[in-house]
Image: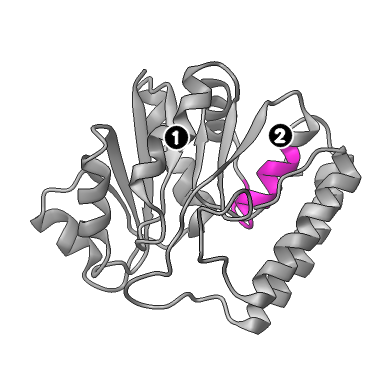
Amino acid sequence: MRILAVIPCYNEEKNIVKTVENIKKEKIDYVVINDGSKDKSLEVLKNNKINHINLNNNVGIGGVMQTGYKYALHNNYDIVVQFDGDGQHDASYINKITKPIIEKKANLVIGSRFVGEESEFKSTKMRRLGINLLSLLLRLMTKREIKDMTSGFRAADKSVIKIFAEKYPYEYPEPVTNLALAKSNCKILEIPVRMKEREHGKSSISKLKSIYYMVNVILLFFIVLISKGDDFNA
């Protein structure tokens, strides 16, 4: 099967080369989507001859990932692996999260911090509280369980690639798409993975932004719940 790692990049000049080098060790294809970075990320990508798509304006993670899924669909990839450019994801787990798709056991596989004991890094206390709340809401709404609702380390098969290439939420994409797919007959698995704290730079999500994030995601959850099928842009 042809596997593509889609790597979002926004101001990751200090992280992106190492991230790509780790992906290359797994013998799969990759594409970096530069989301209008304001630092030297684009220069680093060009100087290191890293396969990339450059977006002149910052469109956010949803627009970036949809670009990657469109690229995968156009180039006939069988599996897309979402892989952060900040060094938090461990490329050695790519085989583990793609295996259930190759074996036809899942359509979407989520690399999870909260299944098993692989990951010592679990995120901040505030974010863990929010993730637990989203997981509870998903269980109440769909009777299905996903423990790591905000994990950006995911693998998607061709059926999900097609859906995400056509429509993908521009905000809060992981929890919203998890809910939308959980409503359908999509087979979703969580696989324990190890995640690390980012090596350089810092997250843009403050405590205030975390609260804002949670309120908006919860509102979107109810919109998705009453929408039809996988219409997460309702």
Task: Name the residue: 47% across, 75% down.
Answer: 203
Residue 191 spot, x, y in % from top left = 56, 40
Q: Which numbered disc, 2 or 1, marks the residue closer to the eye?
A: 1
On the rendered structure, is 142 left or right of 206?
Answer: right
Residue 55 on the magenta span: no
Q: Quadrant of residue 10?
A: bottom left
Residue 92 spot, x, y in % from top left = 34, 44
Q: Quadrant of the N terminus?
A: top left
Would you name the residue on which mark 2 appears? 181
The residue closer to the viewer here, 116 or 98, is 116
Residue 33 spot, x, y in % from top left = 34, 50
Q: Is residue 231 visible?
A: no
Q: Residues within 10 Å of mark 1 (few under 14, many from 20)?
A: some
Would you name the residue on which mark 1 appears? 96
Residue 176 on the magenta span: yes
The residue closer to the viewer here, 71 or 123, is 123
> Magenta segment range?
169-180
Residue 199 spot, x, y in % from top left = 33, 71
